[in-house]
Image (cartoon, rainbow, N blue to C red):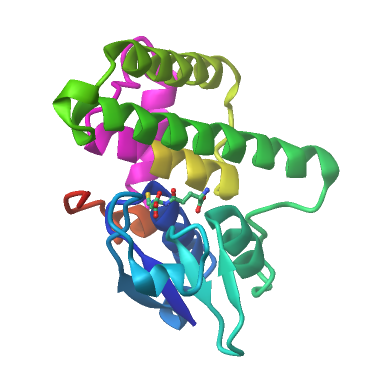
Amino acid sequence: MKLLYQTHSPYARKVLVAAHEIGLASRLEVIHHETSPTRRNEAVYAVNPLGKVPVLLRDDGSVLFDSNVICEYLDGLHDGPKLIPAQATAHYGVLLIQALAQGISDAGIAARWDIERRPEALRWPVLVEAYREKIAATCDYLEREFDVDAVDLGAIALATALSWIEFREVYDFRVRRPRLAAWYERFAQRPSMRATALSGATHD
Ligand SMILES: N[C@@H](CCC(=O)N[C@@H](CS)C(=O)NCC(=O)O)C(=O)O
């Protein structure tokens, strides 16, 4: 299978960390693609009408996109402990944490447009603060509520989202959140995380 990837995407990294954790990374040919709404990547658009990575090209020629969809698909390909547990309470607990993590990445990327990507005259600091407030509230919620030491899709999504906001210096999630910070430190030491460090600049 081919994974259309980006070395500085939290969503693409989430898929690759998941693949490492379930022993499927060696089955993926990882191909880096630069994407930006301001610079059309034809190869990515050819397989995903949203023009975004990650995209999974399966061996039978079919295509999956969106990190949530790809992770769920990969989780069905192995017989080990599932990243998305079947039992209802655990299942929705994991999906909830994944949703919060996606929200952190989405808000972080949106904030970064107004921090450094948009032409200076068009930036709006009010919007940056509004997005940072969402990230702050989510981190506060996680500091109170997130109490998991499992390696599941929620944890993977959260670790890759937090690593991205730190990598791009969008928001310091460690301030006033010792539990979340300590959890992240432990998770970041996993071989799956160490094998997939974020790197590279955005090309708009
Ligand atoms: N919800 C999608 C988000 C994917 C996404 O936004 N990818 C970014 C890279 S970080 C991208 O390719 N952006 C290009 C664009 O917005 O045109 C997922 O979870 O896979």
Give the camera-side residue of 181 and 71.
71
Identified at 55% across, 16% down, the residue is 141
Front residue (pair 135, 123): 123
Q: Report the front residue among 11 and 82.
A: 11
Q: Position of residue 60 (x, y in %)?
A: 61, 90
Instruction: Say left or right for 87 vs 59.
Output: right
Q: Position of residue 79 (x, y in %)?
A: 68, 73
* Residue 11 belongs to the span the image colors magenta: no
Q: Position of residue 7 (x, y in %)?
A: 27, 58
Q: Which residues are magenta?
A: 162-190
Residue 54 occupies which quadrant of the picture?
bottom left
Residue at image location 32% in from the left, 47% down from the top = 189
x, y percentage for residue 204? 22, 49
In the displayed structure, 112 sits above or below 142; it is: below
Q: Residue at x 50, y 73 (%)?
A: 47
Q: Is residue 185 visible?
A: no
The answer to whether residue 180 is magenta is yes
Q: Is residue 98 above or below residue 37?
A: above
